[in-house]
Amino acid sequence: MYKVSEFSKMTGLSKETLRYYAEIKLLEPVFIDPNNKYRYYDNGSYLVARLLVHLRRFNFSIQEMLTVVNDESFENLEQILLKKRQGLVEQVQELNTLIDEMDDFFEFEMEGVEND
């Protein structure tokens, strides 16, 4: 079992994040010592924490992460990841369109300003 400070270092999640995740039941400690209130995590918690780190990196909302974690079989994880990936692809396309529009603006509109 791992204390919060050790678990935080192992996972890259801050102590505050771990506390918050426990509060919202996203990643709860496997044991809380009744004497000193220390929270402990185990290897199963580590796997879930690493998944959460990736989901957060993939821009998942807290609600989306809860959906993934609450599906203990992770049966829908692939579909959820594919849907999120498609959303990211669409965002990239939108950003590329904006970049093209900005380039056109600089090329044509700013050229007119310089010639005045």
Image (cartoon, helix red, strand yellow):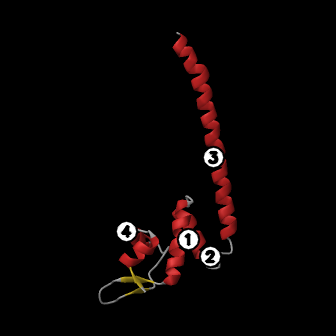
Quadrant of the rendered structure where residue 38 is? bottom left
- Mark 3 or 1 closer to N-term? 1
Q: Position of residue 104 (x, y in %)?
A: 62, 27
Give the residue at x 40% y 73%: 8
- Residue beneath disc 1: 51
Calculate the distance from the C-alpha at mark 1 to the C-alpha at mark 4. 18 Å
Res. 92 mark: 3
Neighbours of disc 4 within 10 Å: few (<14), some (14-19), many (20+): few
- Mark 3 or 2 closer to N-term? 2
Q: Residue furthest top?
A: 116
Q: Position of residue 44 (x, y in %)?
A: 53, 82
The secondary structure type at the circle numbered 2 is: loop
Amino acid carrying mark 1 in the image? Leu
- Mark 3 or 4 closer to N-term? 4
The secondary structure type at the circle numbered 3 is: helix
**Disc 3 versus disc 4: nearer the observer:** 3
Res. 16 mark: 4
Amino acid carrying mark 4 in the image? Glu
**Please, is residue 80 above or below residue 40 in the view?**
above
Amino acid carrying mark 2 in the image? Asp
Amino acid carrying mark 3 in the image? Val
Give the residue at x 52% y 72%: 50
Calculate the distance from the C-alpha at mark 3 to the C-alpha at mark 4. 32 Å
Q: Quick check: can you spot residue 63?
A: no
**Disc 3 versus disc 2: nearer the observer:** 3
Q: Position of residue 113 (x, y in %)?
A: 53, 15
Calculate the distance from the C-alpha at mark 3 to the C-alpha at mark 1. 24 Å
Res. 71 mark: 2
**Disc 2 versus disc 1: nearer the observer:** 1
Give the residue at x 57% y 17%: 111
